[in-house]
Image (cartoon, coloured by chain):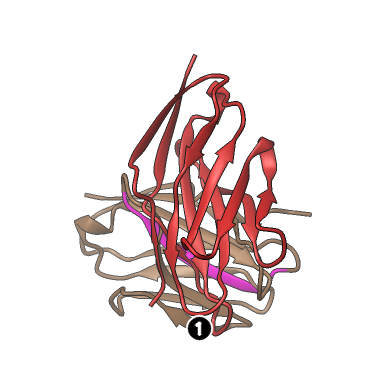
Chain colours: A red, B brown
Amino acid sequence: AQSVAQPEDQVNVAEGNPLTVKCTYSVSGNPYLFWYVQYPNRGLQFLLKYITGDNLVKGSYGFEAEFNKSQTSFHLKKPSALVSDSALYFCAVRPPGGSYIPTFGRGTSLIVHP
Amino acid sequence: ETGVTQSPTHLIKTRGQQVTLRCSSQSGHNTVSWYQQALGQGPQFIFQYYREEENGRGNFPPRFSGLQFPNYSSELNVNALELDDSALYLCASSPPVGSYTFGSGTRLTVV
């Protein structure tokens, strides 16, 4: 069975500083990995995905994520945080076959302080 | 291209009632999934439809049922509502392999 772990319930960072939101996964085979962001009372918005290829994936709003197969991690990063980045972030993993149903992590609340 | 549209946006129901939530998928997407997101939790997978057939189901009881129509829109039906069914219900559509596009959700409150 596949699973996703987001070990931090909350991440606090000062505006302008780099941020990292952690994600580790467990799945059979080569994974499809995703990051989504959720603002209050809204659905999830797609940020980026890793399917294959370059381990460093660039996405929306200046976010990027690094796929590390040996550590089974897919951490979300941004070089310089903005107050407007404050939101709930979800990591998700999809298996490479079958019904492709993704599993989501519990989410990490990112708070960027002015 | 249009996104994913869900209706209604908010709903209040009484315990024991039945509810139907609706979702219009993004153009070109033939897979629709439904998720339940309780307060402070990540989305929990309910079921998925591909070309009008259910092709995956999460750990939800049979009183959660669904449909997908030929135009790939979808419905989620919940019978015999319980207080714990109160949550944000998210619909997402996708091509067979790729990222999901989520709707803004329906906030269901059961009293």
The location of residue A47, given as percent across then percent down, is 62, 47
The location of residue B35, given as percent across then percent down, is 43, 62
Where disc 1 sits, the SS reads: strand
Boundaries of the magenta span: B29-38
Residue A66 vs B75, above or below: the answer is: above
| In the image, farthest residue toward the right | B1
Looking at the rendering, which quadrant does residue B77 occupy? bottom left
Looking at the rendering, which quadrant does residue B2 occupy? bottom right
- What is the crowding at mark 1: few (fewer than 14 residues within 10 Å), some, or many (at least 20)? some
| In the image, farthest residue toward the front | A70
Residue B56 vs B37, above or below: the answer is: below
Q: Residue at x 51, y 49 (%)?
A: A75
Q: Answer yes or no: is residue B102 visible.
A: no
Q: Residue at x 57, y 82 (%)?
A: A97
- Residue underneath mark 1: B54
Q: Residue at x 53, y 22 (%)?
A: A83
Residue type beneath disc 1: Glu
**Chain ID at mark 1:** B
- The quarter in which the N terminus of chain B is drawn is bottom right
The location of residue A55, given as percent across then percent down, is 65, 57
Q: Residue at x 60, y 80 (%)?
A: B50
